[in-house]
């Protein structure tokens, strides 16, 4: 899979909440840092920064703990939005089912257009729920990739530390031999 295809797959999950994410980050930083965050957001949206570069710059401005707190709050807000969408979908579905039951029980004459409109509403709600599921799957994939990148970075740091320790031992042995 090419890099362009993987970026295209990630784009909806990354671009959709970026404005909300920066607003949340602003809650955790000093007001004088807001202009810097706005500039970062502009550069990220215009693709001057990729996600990894954005995270590195955010660490510099917000610090790791504040950035993680902002990400956690953004995830909680996104989950609350998904729950609200789910609830709205089920309410619409129940209303549609009630309409169908009423049409069968009561001697009411209703136009074909009204039934078609009700069907369109249910289909639209189903489409919203499907897109929500796709967005959640994309967010989970991004989280999985971030965890893999973090693990890889920790492994690289461990190897560098081992290499440095080994080099220090060789230098000490060379100094002792001399």
Image (spheres, rainbow, N blue to C red):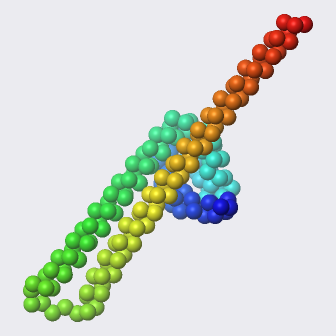
**Quadrant housing the C terminus:** top right
Q: State left or right for residue 143 relative to residue 47.
A: left
Q: Nearer the viewer, residue 118 or 152?
A: 152
Q: Quadrant of residue 159?
A: top right
- Residue 85, quarter of the rendered image: bottom left
Residue, x 57% and y 62% (percent of image)?
Answer: 9
Quarter of the figure with residue 150: top right
Give whichever of 172, 40 is nearer the camera: 172
Which residue of the protein is positioned furthest toward the left in this rendering? 106
Q: Position of residue 92 (x, y in %)?
A: 26, 72
Above/below status of 40 relative to 64: below
Residue extending farthest to the right is 178
Question: Where the N terminus falls, by quadrant?
Answer: bottom right
Q: Is residue 58 visible?
A: no
Q: Residue 88 in the image: state x and y as whole percent.
A: 29, 66
**Residue 151 spot, x, y in % from top left:** 59, 38
| Image-based side of 135 in relation to 51, left or right | left
Give the answer, above or below, for where 117 lies relative to 48: below
Q: Is residue 51 above or below residue 109?
A: above
Q: Residue at x 30, y 85 (%)?
A: 117
Residue visible at 51% across and 48% down in the picture: 143
Q: Position of residue 113 (x, y in %)?
A: 28, 91
Residue at 69% x, 56% y is 48
């Amino acid at each position: 899979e090419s890099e362009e295809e993987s970026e295209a797959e990630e784009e909806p999950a990354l671009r959709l909440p970026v404005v909300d994410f920066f607003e949340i980050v602003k809650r955790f930083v000093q007001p004088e840092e807001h202009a810097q965050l706005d500039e970062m957001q502009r550069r990220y949206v215009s693709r001057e920064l990729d996600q990894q570069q954005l995270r590195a710059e955010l660490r510099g401005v917000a610090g790791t703990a504040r950035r993680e707190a902002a990400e956690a709050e953004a995830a909680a807000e996104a989950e609350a939005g998904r729950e609200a969408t789910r609830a709205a979908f089920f309410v619409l579905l129940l209303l549609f089912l009630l309409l169908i039951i009423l049409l069968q029980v009561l001697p009411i004459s209703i136009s074909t257009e009204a039934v078609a409109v009700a069907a369109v509403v249910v289909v639209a709600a189903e489409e919203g729920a499907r897109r929500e599921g796709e967005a959640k799957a994309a967010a989970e994939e991004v989280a999985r990739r971030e965890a893999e990148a973090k693990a890889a970075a920790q492994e690289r740091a461990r190897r560098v530390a081992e290499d440095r320790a080994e080099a220090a031992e060789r230098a000490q042995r060379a100094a002792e031999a001399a």
